[in-house]
Image: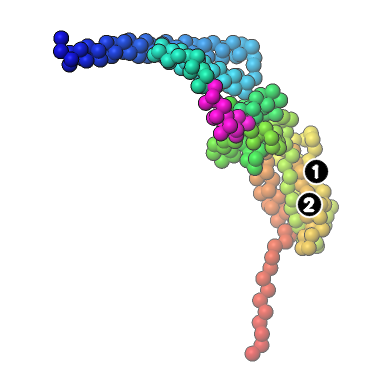
């Protein structure tokens, strides 16, 4: 047997040995992925029957998915002949290095846990945070997704979100609509208040309890400003906001009450 034939047989044996291991790893990955999928579906079913909060369901399912996939990767690498103990040590060292480099991501994970524990909001709530307003679409491990008022997707890191101010407009189910309207100084205050209140009480989406209010808020340079405060359901906020603004303009015009605006005066000089 010549040298070339020995080398060929050697490489064939190596290819056969590692080919079997690779095939085994692939089979384990396929079966493991199927099992993980079934386990996750089972977790979702159990939590749904247990009436767990939807936000918590999504967070725990996401967390379980990551953990199970890491275990599957370690098992697959062990099938390939990689020492899992050595791999675990390497993974721990790498995890420490990555953790130091990605402190922001760890704070986001911690922020997600805090959100799950204290529950400042849940899926579907309308919140204001970090200068953004939107309905909570998803609470993941590292980020929270909102659907903005113009249907844009807003992604906020959980670390920043949990450490900042959060305004939840959905908790009480109602919102106060804060509007300000100015009229001329020649206008009758009592009559103006009656006109403004009539606009509020005639709107079908303005709540009777809490009752709407109309008060003089400021004697400005060129106008008497009225603070108009109707209440509505959270879902009707913008409808009430825009409708009342339009209806007030029409009602004041009909009542002959002037809304002040800048006037331009032309001065003609004699030649």
Q: Position of residue 61 (x, y in %)?
A: 56, 18
Placement of 64 over or under 227, stated as above or below:
above
Is 152 part of what is drawn in magenta?
Answer: no
Mark identifier at residue 86: none
Is 98 part of what is drawn in magenta?
Answer: yes
Mark identifier at residue 226: 2
Binning the other alpha carbons within 10 Å of mark 1 as few (below 14), some (14 to 19) or many (20 upward) gives some
Tell me what residue is drawn at x 63 percent, y 31 percent: 107
Which comes before the other along the chain, label 1 or label 2?
A: 1
Tell me what residue is drawn at x 50 percent, y 21 percent: 90
Q: How far is the residue under mark 1 from the one under mark 2?
A: 10 Å
Tell me what residue is drawn at x 72 percent, y 58 percent: 259
Most frequent secondary structure within the magenta stretch? helix
Magenta residues (range): 92-108
Quadrant of residue 130 within the rendered picture: top right
Mark identifier at residue 213: 1
């Amino acid at each position: 047997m010549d040298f070339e034939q020995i080398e060929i047989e050697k490489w064939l044996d190596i290819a056969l040995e590692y080919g079997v291991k690779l095939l085994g790893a692939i089979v384990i990955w396929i079966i493991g992925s199927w099992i993980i999928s079934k386990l996750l579906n089972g977790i979702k079913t159990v939590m749904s029957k247990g009436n767990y909060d939807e936000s918590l369901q999504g967070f725990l399912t996401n967390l379980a998915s990551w953990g199970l996939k890491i275990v599957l990767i370690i098992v697959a690498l062990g099938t390939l002949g990689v020492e899992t103990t050595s791999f675990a040590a390497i993974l721990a060292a790498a995890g420490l290095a990555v953790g130091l480099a990605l402190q922001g991501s760890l704070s986001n994970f911690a922020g997600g846990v805090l959100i799950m524990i204290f529950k400042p909001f849940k899926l579907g709530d309308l919140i204001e945070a970090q200068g953004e307003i939107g309905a909570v679409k998803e609470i993941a491990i590292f980020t929270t997704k909102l659907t903005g008022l113009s249907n844009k997707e807003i992604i906020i890191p959980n670390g920043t979100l949990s450490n900042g101010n959060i305004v939840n407009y959905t908790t009480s189910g109602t919102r106060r609509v804060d509007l300000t309207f100015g009229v001329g100084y020649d206008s009758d205050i009592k009559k103006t208040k009656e006109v403004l209140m009539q606009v509020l009480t005639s709107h079908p989406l303005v709540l009777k309890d809490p009752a709407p209010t109309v008060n003089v808020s400021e004697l400005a340079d060129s106008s008497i400003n009225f603070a108009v405060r109707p209440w509505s359901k959270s879902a009707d906020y913008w409808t009430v906001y825009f409708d009342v603004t339009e209806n007030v303009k029409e009602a004041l015009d009909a009542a002959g009450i002037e809304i002040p605006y800048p006037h331009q005066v032309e001065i003609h000089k004699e030649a």
